[in-house]
Amino acid sequence: KLPVLHAVDDRLSPETGLEGVSPSRRNLLLTSAVIGSTAFASKASKSPSVNNIPSPASSVLTLEQATEIIGLRCNKKFLHNVIASEYRFLYFGVPDLQSPTIRFDPPDLLLPSAYDSRDAANYFQRLDERMKTELVRPSNGHLGTTNPSEAAKWGTPSSVWPLGDCHFAWLADGGNFLGSTGNILVDGLNCGEVSLDDALRNPRTEIMFSGTEGFLTVPIGLDKSLRKALQESFFI
């Protein structure tokens, strides 16, 4: 049995019941994110380093450049939900990653090599057919996880920041996609279910994402510094 798809509105509304965050706190987080995004973009445009960000052909970055890219180019829906989750990060395993890097990895969930398993590839192929009307699905998406130990199976756990126009999907009950028969939530109209920031708060869940401009990865060893820089930029 394949998962039943539902749409969900990932806007920061009190009805989603974010654990440990009051409605007023959630509204403050969202308002601060929007105001912070504008202020950050204005500040970054005047920063010397933002004019020296490497091209995609040379995409290894400093932490300062990575922080500026997050403020300027990270998908705003995703960034606002990271802020609303009180800076819980989504992770992606990258072999031998040493520095922040912009990546353009092609989707590989339909390939047996992704999990070293033909059964896994068959599962994602069936899921892709089920999700064929969605803007994010296995054939055009990547899987990130809120669990760094899970990401480490594929390489250095790194926070991942989708760039440009992006879409997201996650399991209503959390956990990993492979083998799941649970409901999948795709960003869209309000169904009153688990929002994206709720999913980020779950310590063991995967989030599928697709994007138009690649994605930024920052090694987990820089988490503390990156989180501090983002908190200072967005006034939280």
Image (cartoon, grey):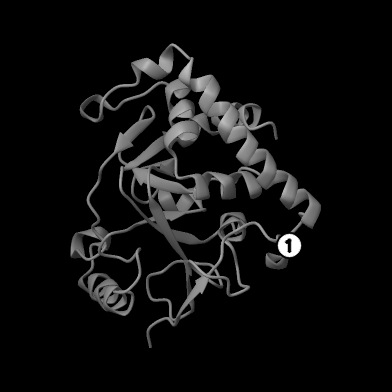
* Above or below 164: residue 42: above
The picture places residue 223, in percent across and down from the top left corner, at 54, 34
Q: Quadrant of residue 86?
A: top right
The picture places residue 51, in percent across and down from the top left corner, at 37, 16
Front-most of 96 and 142? 142
User: Badge 1, how many Cα within 10 Å: few under 14, some, many 20+?
Assistant: some
Front-most of 193 and 35? 35
Residue farthest to the top, as pictured: 48
At horizontal 54% and vertical 45% (from top left) the residue drawn is 89
* Above or below 155: residue 201: below
Query: Residue beneath label 1, please?
Result: 14
Front-most of 147 and 108? 108
The picture places residue 221, in percent across and down from the top left corner, at 49, 31
At horizontal 25% and vertical 59% (from top left) the residue drawn is 114
Q: Is residue 218 left or right of residue 103?
A: right
At horizontal 53% and vertical 44% (from top left) the residue drawn is 79
User: Is there any visible trace of residue 224 in the rendered image?
Assistant: no
User: Is there any visible trace of residue 171 in the rendered image?
Assistant: yes
Helix, strand or loop at label 1? It is helix
* Above or below 78: residue 156: above
Tell me the quarter of the image containing the C terminus. top right
**Which residue type carries mark 1?**
Pro
Residue farthest to the bottom, as pictured: 1
Q: Quadrant of residue 66?
A: top left
Tell me the quarter of the image containing the N terminus. bottom left
Q: Is residue 139 left or right of residue 207?
A: left
